[in-house]
């Protein structure tokens, strides 16, 4: 998948927008924030504890204030706090144990702060809680098993912390959960089978942890799942065939694990997929022809495996592809001409394989292509002159092949940022290049005679 930092930034932006939308909905439908409702004395203890723990004074967080004047709060007519939204509030310190007194709380959003310490077990004493967001803090320690006591919980975000230990098996009790985001922590152990009983689950992200063991074969029960990310763990074994029955999936990311075996032939059943990440594993066999049925696919990453065989001729069916990375495998055969039908491609990397034959002439049909890498193969023949009309191309790598002929004079260095042709059998004169200072690099030692 895309670089982790970029992916994390995109996810955080999405979560922030999603949280804002849900908060507006809650405010619109709630009858619980009447003006001048005083915060109950019991609830005010928690607010006071927060201000002490966080070393800050928050407007309206006192026993005498009305709920309508309190920053980030919603209350019932009884004065019981029903929602706290203090995301991105620049608060630090621990979450007080007295949070267990907020028995009417349905919404708790403390994400994007600098909260530290452990998550209080008392969070499990909030029976009305539906939304719990602690993403992007500095929380440590294990996930309290008591969270499994929240029967109404629908969304749980704890990603981007320093949480350790296993995923509690009791998470299987959260039968109303539709979103579980635990990515970007240091969680260990295996994926509990109990998670596969959460048949309302739509989004599951356990990426960027230290999870081990195999992917549960019983994922077939998660028939509402639209996004599954298990990337950057230490998962082993094969990709279970059961995953290919999850026909609501639009994102499947299993990259950067230790998975082995072939890509399941049934992968073509996932016809709603928009992004498929299988890179950096130990997958074997060939790319299944069924992958060409994924006509909604925008991003396909299978780099750094042990794949063999040809690129499927039907690859051109994936007309929505913007990013295709097949690099660092042992893929053989020629580059199928149908690949030039992928007119939406921005990034194409087929480098580091065993491809032979010539480079297709009609690459110029890929009008938005910015990065083209064909390096480290056994490609023969000349560099196609059609490359000269690819005005969007910024990075071109054709080094370490068996290309012959002259360097075309059509290449326009005003558009290219990097051109690498070393390690070929090119001959003739280097064409005149009109190069702005410090804007262009010719790398390597191509044989020029």
Image: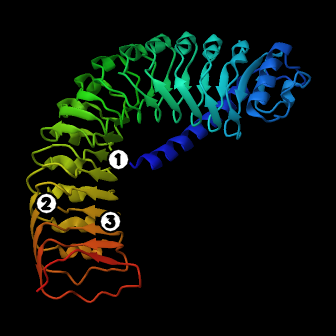
Crowding at mark 3 (Cα within 10 Å: few <14, some 14-19, many 20+):
some
Looking at marks 3 and 2 on the same chain, the residue that comes earlier in the sequence is marked by 3
At 83% from the left and 28% from the top, the residue drawn is 61
* Residue 140 position by quadrant: top right
Which structural element holds mark 2?
loop
Image height check: is 27 above or below 10?
above
In the rendering, at what x and y percent does residue 137 appear?
59, 35
**Picture disc at residue 377:** 2
The answer to whether mark 2 and mark 1 are in CB contact below 8 A is no
Find disc 1 in the rendering and name its residue.
Answer: 298
Q: Quadrant of the N terminus?
A: top left
Q: Position of residue 252 (x, y in %)?
A: 34, 35
CA gap, disc 3 to disc 1? Answer: 16 Å
**Mark drawn on residue 367:** 3
User: Eyeballing the image, is 290 above or below 133?
Assistant: below
The scheme the figure's colours follow is: rainbow
Say which of marks 2 and 1 sits in front: 2
Q: Is residue 243 left or right of residue 287?
A: right
> From this viewpoint, is residue 127 visible?
no
Q: Are marks 3 and 2 in contact (CB under 8 Å)?
A: no
């Amino acid at each position: 998948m895309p670089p982790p930092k970029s992916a994390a930034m995109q996810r955080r932006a999405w979560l922030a927008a999603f949280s804002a939308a849900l908060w507006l909905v809650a405010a619109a439908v709630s009858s619980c924030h009447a003006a001048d409702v005083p915060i109950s004395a019991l609830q005010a203890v928690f607010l006071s504890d927060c201000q002490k723990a966080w070393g800050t004074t928050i407007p309206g967080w006192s026993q005498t204030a009305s709920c309508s004047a309190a920053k980030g709060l919603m209350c019932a007519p009884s004065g019981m706090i029903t929602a706290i939204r203090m995301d991105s509030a620049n608060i630090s310190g621990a979450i007080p144990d007295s949070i267990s007194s907020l028995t009417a709380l349905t919404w708790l959003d403390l994400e994007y702060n600098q909260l530290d310490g452990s998550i209080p077990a008392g969070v499990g004493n909030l029976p009305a809680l539906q939304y719990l967001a602690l993403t992007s803090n500095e929380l440590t320690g294990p996930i309290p098993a008591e969270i499994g006591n929240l029967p109404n919980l629908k969304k749980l975000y704890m990603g981007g912390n320093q949480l350790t230990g296993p995923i509690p098996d009791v998470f299987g009790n959260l039968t109303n959960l539709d979103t579980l985001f635990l990515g970007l922590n240091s969680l260990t152990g295996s994926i509990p089978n109990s998670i596969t009983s959460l048949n309302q689950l739509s989004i599951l992200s356990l990426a960027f942890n230290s999870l081990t063991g195999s992917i549960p074969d019983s994922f077939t029960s998660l028939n509402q799942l639209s996004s599954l990310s298990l990337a950057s763990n230490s998962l082993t074994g094969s990709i279970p065939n059961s995953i290919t029955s999850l026909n609501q999936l639009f994102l499947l990311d299993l990259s950067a694990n230790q998975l082995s075996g072939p890509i399941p032939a049934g992968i073509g059943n996932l016809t709603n997929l928009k992004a498929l990440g299988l890179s950096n594993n130990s997958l074997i066999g060939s790319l299944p022809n069924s992958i060409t049925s994924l006509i909604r696919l925008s991003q396909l990453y299978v780099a750094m495996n042990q794949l063999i065989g040809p690129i499927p001729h039907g690859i051109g069916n994936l007309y929505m592809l913007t990013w295709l990375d097949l690099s660092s495998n042992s893929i053989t055969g020629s580059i199928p001409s149908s690949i030039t039908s992928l007119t939406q491609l921005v990034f194409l990397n087929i480098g580091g394989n065993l491809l032979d034959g010539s480079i297709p002439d009609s690459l110029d049909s890929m009008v938005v292509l910015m990065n083209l890498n064909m390096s480290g193969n056994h490609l023969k023949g000349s560099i196609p002159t059609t490359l000269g009309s690819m005005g969007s191309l910024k990075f071109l790598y054709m080094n370490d092949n068996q290309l012959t002929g002259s360097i075309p004079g059509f290449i326009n260095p005003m558009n290219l940022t990097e051109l690498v042709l070393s390690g070929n059998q090119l001959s003739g004169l280097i064409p005149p290049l009109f190069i702005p200072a410090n804007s262009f690099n010719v790398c390597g030692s191509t044989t020029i005679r």
